Image (spheres, rainbow, N blue to C red):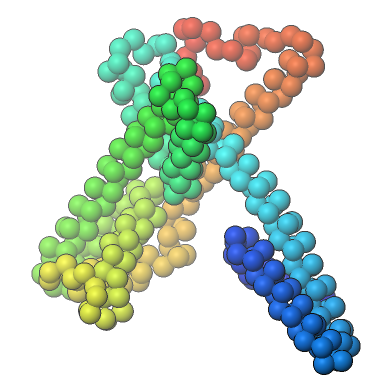
């Protein structure tokens, strides 16, 4: 029924937001036009008139729903970008802290800061860094100033942040790989599962979700092998069966509800930090707006003076 159109199409948001939607609608309209012309030639122009009118109305509704979804996605994207930029800003503040008198001090402080923020350095943040770098490179390339230090400072900041984030994430991945190798070295299935259980029982809260993801990524690299089809799978020697067992054991020992339970502290911490980042962003916006309206600005509140330590999260 037409009154349930929006409810039904909400299950197909990927189609409504895809680049193919306009082409699909055009194709449908052209098909209706061809049928109308064929009916006119046969003197049956009223044969599909009501049906096509109803289809056109549905297509108009689909286009309107898609427009609303695009606006919603843009709003969510803008909000997400704000949180991502605040993470970058926080890292930059640590790098610019004048209390660090040597490069070594700055490097240690940056390493500690990035490590403290690791729960926020998720797939979305990594993807945003890639997107932001590609967008900035494209903008500079179009202006012909990619290599001009006067214009490419932000690009270098993004690349430096990306390098630091990748370095920190690689440390975590290496640790998860070490855990996996310890488990795979056990000779029997029972021993492997028991060791895995012990590792999970003492695993830090912020490591639970990344560990599960690494296991799934390794097993997914086996291709169709995970389904028992070894024709085009990459067989990692005698480890294939152990890896498949590892994934099954992880799924059994870490069902979604237990993952949520073990990760709740890390999730709560990350949520709190994101809220604090947004609060700082909103406060900065309010101060800038107040400065615009009054024509004055309080440097003690808005501008950090040399020697003032940048704010750090606990």
Q: Quick check: 68 above or below 159?
A: below
Residue 108 in picture, x, y percent from top left: 31, 24
Residue at 33% across, 63% down: 216
Residue at 42% across, 60% down: 259
298 sits to left or right of 112? right
Q: Is residue 207 visible?
A: yes
Q: Is residue 242 visible?
A: no
Residue 258 in picture, x, y percent from top left: 43, 63
Q: Quadrant of the N terminus?
A: bottom right
Q: Nearer the viewer, residue 253 or 107?
A: 107
128 sits to left or right of 27? left
- Check the image and name the residue furthest to the front: 41
Residue at 61% across, 46% down: 77
Residue at 48% across, 52% down: 264
Residue 69 in picture, x, y percent from top left: 69, 57
Q: Quick check: 205 above or below 52?
A: above
Q: Nearer the viewer, residue 38 or 190?
A: 38
């Amino acid at each position: 029924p037409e009154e349930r159109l929006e409810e039904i199409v909400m299950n197909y948001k990927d189609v409504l937001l895809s680049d193919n939607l306009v082409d699909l609608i055009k194709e449908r309209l052209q098909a209706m036009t061809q049928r109308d012309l064929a009916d006119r030639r046969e003197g049956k122009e009223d044969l599909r008139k009501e049906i096509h009118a109803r289809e056109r109305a549905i297509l108009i509704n689909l286009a309107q729903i898609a427009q609303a979804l695009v606006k919603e996605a843009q709003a969510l994207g803008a909000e997400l970008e704000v949180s991502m930029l605040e993470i970058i800003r926080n890292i930059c503040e640590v790098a610019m802290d004048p209390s660090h008198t040597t490069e070594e001090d700055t490097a240690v402080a940056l390493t500690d800061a990035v490590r403290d923020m690791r729960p926020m350095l998720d797939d979305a943040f990594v993807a945003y860094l890639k997107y932001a770098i590609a967008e900035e490179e494209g903008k500079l390339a179009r202006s012909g100033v990619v290599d001009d230090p006067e214009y490419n400072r932000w690009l270098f900041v993004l690349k430096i942040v990306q390098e630091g984030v990748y370095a920190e994430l690689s440390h975590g991945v290496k640790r998860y790989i070490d855990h996996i190798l310890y488990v795979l070295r056990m000779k029997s299935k029972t021993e492997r599962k028991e060791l895995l259980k012990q590792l999970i029982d003492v695993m830090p809260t912020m490591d639970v979700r990344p560990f599960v993801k690494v296991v799934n990524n390794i097993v997914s690299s086996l291709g169709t092998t995970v389904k028992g089809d070894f024709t085009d799978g990459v067989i990692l020697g005698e480890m294939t069966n152990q890896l498949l067992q590892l994934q099954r054991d992880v799924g059994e020992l870490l069902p979604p509800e237990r993952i949520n339970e073990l990760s709740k502290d890390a999730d709560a911490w990350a949520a709190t930090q994101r809220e604090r980042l947004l609060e700082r962003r909103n406060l900065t916006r309010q101060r800038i707006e107040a400065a615009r309206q009054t024509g004055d600005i309080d440097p003690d509140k808005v501008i950090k003076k040399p020697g003032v330590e940048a704010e750090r999260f606990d």
